[in-house]
Amino acid sequence: MRRKKHWLVQPHNIKRLWGVFAMVLVLSVAPNVLLHPHAYFGLDGSFGFFAWYGFVTCVAMVFISKWLGWLVKRKDDYYHDD
């Protein structure tokens, strides 16, 4: 008996998800075209600040977590060393 693939790994749903993600990104930047940002600092008044700042901080968290994982990594037989 053949099992049905999970809906997240079906090719037609992957294309739909990319479209939804792209639309969310466009919608997160679109208000910057219509609204004037009231910046508290100089940088947060730039176009699409919250979109690119969120992306940059997410990428930074991934790299920092990889570095921390490397820093605190132990051998597989750590508890079996006598």
Image (tube, rainbow, N blue to C red):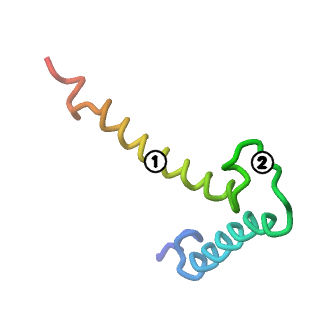
Closer to the camera, 56 or 44?
A: 44
* Amino acid type at mark 2: Ala
Q: Quadrant of residue 52?
A: bottom right
Question: What residue sits 57% from the left and 75% below the top?
Answer: 14
Measured as percent of width and height from the top left, residue 42 is found at 69, 47
The answer to the question of whether label 2 and label 1 lie on touching residues, with beta carbons closer than 8 A, is no
Q: Is residue 56 above or below residue 22?
A: above
Q: Residue at the top extreme?
A: 82
Q: Is 72 situated left or right of 13 in this image?
A: left
Measured as percent of width and height from the top left, residue 33 is found at 80, 69
Closer to the camera, 18 or 33?
A: 33
- Which of the two discs, 2 and 1, labels the residue nearer the N terminus? 2
Label 2 SS: loop
Measured as percent of width and height from the top left, residue 51 is found at 66, 58
* Amino acid type at mark 1: Val
Label 1 SS: helix
User: What residue is shown with label 1?
Assistant: 62
Q: Residue at the front extreme?
A: 42
Q: Residue at the right extreme?
A: 35
User: What residue is shown with label 2?
Assistant: 39
Crowding around mark 2 (Cα neighbors within 10 Å: few <14, some 14 to 19, many 20+) is few
Image quadrant in which the C terminus is located: top left
Q: Is 15 situated left or right of 31 in this image?
A: left
Q: Which tag is nearer the camera, tag 2 or tag 1?
A: 2
Crowding around mark 1 (Cα neighbors within 10 Å: few <14, some 14 to 19, many 20+) is few
Question: What residue sits 42% from the left and 41% below the top?
Answer: 64
Counting the numbered discs, the total is: 2
Question: What residue sits 58% from the left and 82% below the top?
Answer: 12
Q: Residue at the bottom extreme?
A: 12
